[in-house]
Amino acid sequence: MATIAFSTGSLHTYGISRAFELAAEAGFEAVEVLIDHRWDSRQPAYLKRLSRESGLPIVAVHSPFVPHVPGWPSDPLGRLQHSAALARELKAGIVVAHLPLRIHAAKVEFFGLSKRPLLLPVPFPVSSDYRRFLLNGLDQFEADEEVLVGVENMPAKRVLGRHLDIHSLNTLDELANLSHLTLDTTHLATWQLDPGEVYERFGTRVVHIHLSNFDGEEHKLPQTGHLPLADFLQRLRQTHYQGAVSVELRPDVLQAEDEEQVRMHLRRVVAFCREHLGRG
């Protein structure tokens, strides 16, 4: 039976304790902790206490996807190693990791002129060590660290008005070379891929799911957008998927400036997931 989890990244503008509290109130069954700029997001004793007090187990740790997190290594492999150690201490069975970058992109925003920032390619060299590790060293790493690393499929980016894949190993054929995957539904939508069809293709390789919808913008509420996520959740139920379905949204989608709106949205998300996962 799938576990309905809440990613703390959905409310990265809030404190970690508040995210746990709201998730518990809404009826979520577990939490995925995103390691980010918040010191509390990487303090095991504190996270254990929040888990115990809220009654929500931590089922996944999301490795930082930016290089500059205080007290954490800047390289992707170092970040993954530290994240695995934290996950092991928290008894979280999954570490979510991003794919390696092929190129970097700089975000340029024109305040008041455009809703979307402009991404410009930046020709900084990207190390291939992390790519080689994912292809050749990940299975041994999982055995040594006693965690599963669910490598996440990544979105298409718009660079100079065109779709561009700034990540390596991000095609379906390349992802098939990895043992365990985190399937992100909104990222699939940027490539016009159906999450149910991709899930069927990868089967038991999928050990974790990031659930959100897409309407031209990523990480929308599951019940609003172009993706048929009701059908997707029903397919998970039919195939007896046993991992976590982690709801990963944006604070603005939850109307984070108004906590009552956040509570309403989270309750509706849980109800949507429970209905279509067949939980009554």
Image (spheres, rainbow, N blue to C red):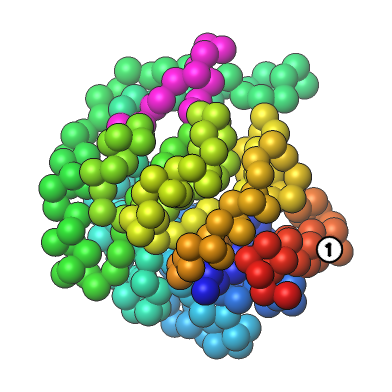
Q: Give the range drawn in magenta.
A: 156-169
How far from the left and from the top, in percent, is residue 94?
38, 66
Residue 122 vs 72, above or below: the answer is above
Quadrant location of the C terminus in the rendered image: bottom right
Can residue 7 be seen? no
Q: Which residue is drawn at 51% across and 29% down?
A: 191
Find numbered disc 1 in the image and state the secondary structure of the residue it sits on. Answer: helix
> Does residue 163 show up magenta in the picture?
yes
Of residue 66 and residue 187, the one placed in the foreground of this image is 187
Badge 1: residue crowd in 10 Å (few <14, some 14–19, many ≥20): few
Is 66 left or right of 196, judged from the image as shown?
left
> Does residue 255 show up magenta in the picture?
no
Residue 165 vs 204, above or below: the answer is above
Figure quadrant of residue 17: bottom right
Can residue 231 be seen? yes
Figure quadrant of residue 246: bottom right
Of residue 30 and residue 64, the one placed in the foreground of this image is 30
Figure quadrant of residue 18: bottom right
Residue 270 vs 52, above or below: the answer is above
Q: Which residue is drawn at 35% across and 32% down?
A: 171
How far from the left and from the top, in percent, is residue 35?
46, 59
How far from the left and from the top, in percent, is residue 50?
57, 81
Q: Which residue is drawn at 68% across and 62% down?
A: 276
Is 134 left or right of 89, judged from the image as shown?
left
Residue carrying label 1 = 264
Task: Name the amino acid type tagged 1.
Answer: Met
Of residue 243 and residue 275, the one placed in the foreground of this image is 275
How far from the left and from the top, in percent, is residue 1?
52, 74
Is 55 left or right of 172, judged from the image as shown?
right
